[in-house]
Image (cartoon, rainbow, N blue to C red):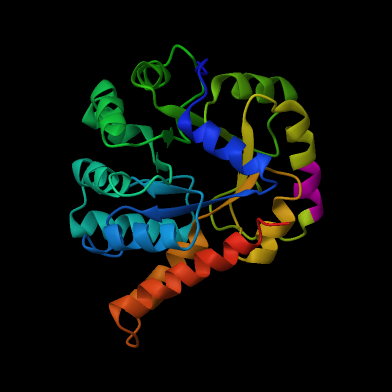
Amino acid sequence: MAVNVESRLSAHLRGLAERGEKALGMFITSGFPDLNATPDLLDAIDAGGADFIELGMPFSDPLAEGIPIQRSSARALEAGVTMAKTLEYARDFTSRSDTPLLLMGYGNPVMQYGISNFFRDARSSGVEGVILPDVLPDPESPFFRSAAEHGVDTVCLVSPTTPTARLEHIDRLSSGFVYAVSVTGVTGANTGDASPILDYLRRVKQTVRENALMVGFGIRSAENVRTMVSEADGAIVGSALVNLVADVWDGEAGSRAERLAAVTAFVADLKSGTRS
């Protein structure tokens, strides 16, 4: 059930559009590459100019994720990250930054935490929205009802195989934005030839009118971002950032400050692709 009052996330994205700027969203897994890294990584991403950040909630069976995010989730769980810790990271970040923060993950950990408890605590932690790819978009779902009750946006996903009637339904139900998966498959998949993706985004954009349209999966560079936002309101990058963090954290060279600076520089380069 889409909220009637414009949410802070929606207003933020609308403000970008009014300035002629497209949005950049960045994904990083909570507790990866270690429990102490997440607060600094969130700040580094923020410093790079991300317009919103998705903090991944690790899960043992992340079906929609490619190998990089699967590995980051496994590593975070091995390190001992919990839902409570993820909410603590969120609360800490939102206490010092106005950049919208979303949580992304799967329904099972939310149910284990308690659906109503989760959305209550997400809201009190400053979380603006939640993305749960395996939860069916149903207004009577306890997920959607609890999210609406606590004022948390619910972002729904569409794919190249989503029919028009389903797009209309998802647009009505989503709040914050609609997440367009660029290719059928898992995160990190190579987008290849962009032409079919742009055709698909044009089709979706004709139907999705109540929400901004963000595109994700397989976006790795500023040039990828620039191409995709020609037919969308913004782009989301996840696996490429997770790969970078794994490389710089596990490499032998560089101080912690230099590693974080590399993350900030990567995000800033991607953000350059959103500006006309």
Whether residue 191 is visible here, answered yes or no, is no
Image quadrant holding the C terminus, namely bottom right
Name the chief secondary structure element in magenta: helix
Q: Is 256 on the left-hand or right-hand side of 155?
A: left
The answer to which of 125 and 87 lies nearer the viewer is: 125
The answer to which of 114 and 65 lies nearer the viewer is: 114
Residue 221 in the image: state x and y as whole percent.
62, 66
How many numbered circles does the render carry? Answer: 0
Whether residue 51 is visible here, answered yes or no, is yes
- Work out whether 74 lies above or below 198: below
Q: Residue furthest bottom?
A: 253
Residue depicted at 58% across the width and 68% down the height: 269
Residue 149 in the image: state x and y as whole percent.
36, 16
Q: Residue furthest front?
A: 19
Residue depicted at 29% across the width and 45% down the height: 90
Q: Is 178 on the left-hand or right-hand side of 1?
A: right
Residue 137 in the image: state x and y as whole percent.
51, 23
Residue 91 in the image: state x and y as whole percent.
25, 43
User: Where are the magenta residues, as a range?
Assistant: 195-200
Residue depicted at 54% across the width and 32% down the height: 10
